[in-house]
Amino acid sequence: MLIPSAVALCATVAAAETVLPGDVTFADGAIEQPLTDGAGDPDRGKEIMTSRGKGNCIACHQVEALSEAPFHGEVGPPLDYVGEYRSAAELRGIVANAKMTFEGSVMPAFYKTSGFIRPGDAYTGDAAPADLPPILTAQEIEDVIAFLQTLKDG
Amino acid sequence: GLAPIAWAGGPDDDELVINGDIEIVTETDAPAHLEELDTIYSGWRFRTDETQALQLDDFDNPGMIFVDQAMDSWGTVEGTEGKSCAACHGDDPAESMTGVRAVYPKWNEDAGEVRTLAMQINDCRQNQMGAEPYGYTSADMTAMEALISVQSRGMPVNVAIDGPAADTWEQGKEMYYTRYGQLELSCANCHEQNYGNYIRADHLSQGQINAFPTYRLKQAKLIQQHNRFQGCIRDTRAETFKPGSPEFVALELYVASRGNGLSVEGPSVRN
């Protein structure tokens, strides 16, 4: 079981240097400072974007580089080439809380833990626990950013 | 190659005539109160041809089995008063129940409340028959609603939103635009802003309830509108409301009113 222990180790290291959801500072919707000092892993980011319980980004976005995962939605714009015209800081801000960039966006905030109406405990329909975790961890956000940055022409 | 996506661009152009006889209005002008939409559509228009076909003939509609079951319940004596539905409403529900589904939820003057069809059925069971109420979304209840809906198929939904129902309607409207849960999504975000678009593998409809109860192929059973509301709110990572709760009654009145002018269609078939 090499992989799980490696992941656990990363998580411990990252936890020490994590910017908590309530401490994130936005400048024009962007977040300059990485949320952890562990580098983002684009392969993990790819998995997070397609897995239903995690980012499930393809529920709303079409991404050609993720075409092996079935069914891409059309609620949001296609994300091909987004790494070309958006900086890491802009992407971090959009994924953490898209409403800071696009007012009233239907895109959920993936790194936010308060200010919700009737928050639930994931997809159970029950009330959220008092210490509601963000949908994605700081490391998972960085992983997604790392993947989005690979979406460039050529 | 690309992942399977179908750029849907909205409802299809198919027409629904049940048994070659009952014409169903699946597209019409939005009611005056609904300023955000010009045209309203039944959810049937957003389903695949295969799913749509199951509603063309009652022999193919898996929801019709439950109509037959409810017909048995209709004539069954239950409770302390020794009565069946038929005892008061006659042997043939077509004679007493035609047009009823189309106007529910409806204000009940004596009770001083807005009643859904399910609430009225349980009121009759408890206060007229002395029988146990059905569970709000139980199989028996949903089947009885299907039996009553069938009597109004093809008639326009026409729920009243003014007078004493106005406060409940306002409450439902507010809920429709509230962004619930950790995903912060309202009914309107999906069913008003994005109908016609795919969200993952689902082709979003306007979330109308003219066609309830609905036989869901995925769940292989007949489901009621409050089950659907519960599922949609749960999917926003929210704490849901309970079926039969005052909140869902208000939401049902409001959602029903967004479909005023569409035909009563239940029991329908959806995926």
Image (cartoon, rainbow, N blue to C red):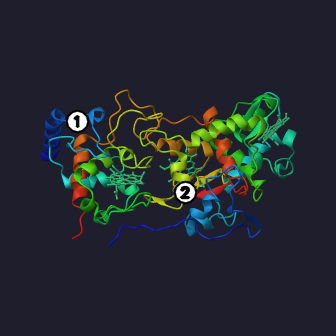
Q: Disc 2 designates what residue?
A: B217
Taking depth in this image into account, of A80 and B198 the one nearest to the observer is A80
On the image, the x and y values in percent for residue B93 come to: 82, 49
Residue A31 placement (x, y as % from top left) = 26, 44
Q: Quadrant of residue B21?
A: bottom right
Q: In this orientation, which residue lies closer to the viewer: A44 or B260?
A: B260
Q: Decide: is A34 above or below A51.
A: above
On residue A19, the disc is 1
Which quadrant, please, contains the C terminus of chain A?
Answer: bottom left
In which chain is the residue bearing label 2? B
Q: Position of residue B201 (x, y in %)?
A: 45, 60
Q: Residues within 10 Å of mark 2 (few under 14, many from 20)?
A: few
- Marks 1/2: CA distance? 45 Å
Query: In the image, what residue type sits under mark 1?
Result: Val
Let me know if marks 1 and 2 both belong to one chain. no
Q: Residue furthest front?
A: A28
- Of tags 1 and 2, which is closer to the observer? 1
What amino acid type is highlighted by mark number 2? Leu
Confirm or deny contact between disc 1 and disc 2 (CB under 8 A): no
Q: Is residue B12 visible?
A: yes
Residue in view at x 51 percent, y 42 percent = B233
Task: Determine the chain carrying the residue at label 1.
Answer: A
The answer to whether any part of residue B137 appears in the image is no
Q: Is residue A91 left or right of residue B252?
A: left
Local SS, label 2? loop
Q: Secondary structure at mark 1?
A: loop
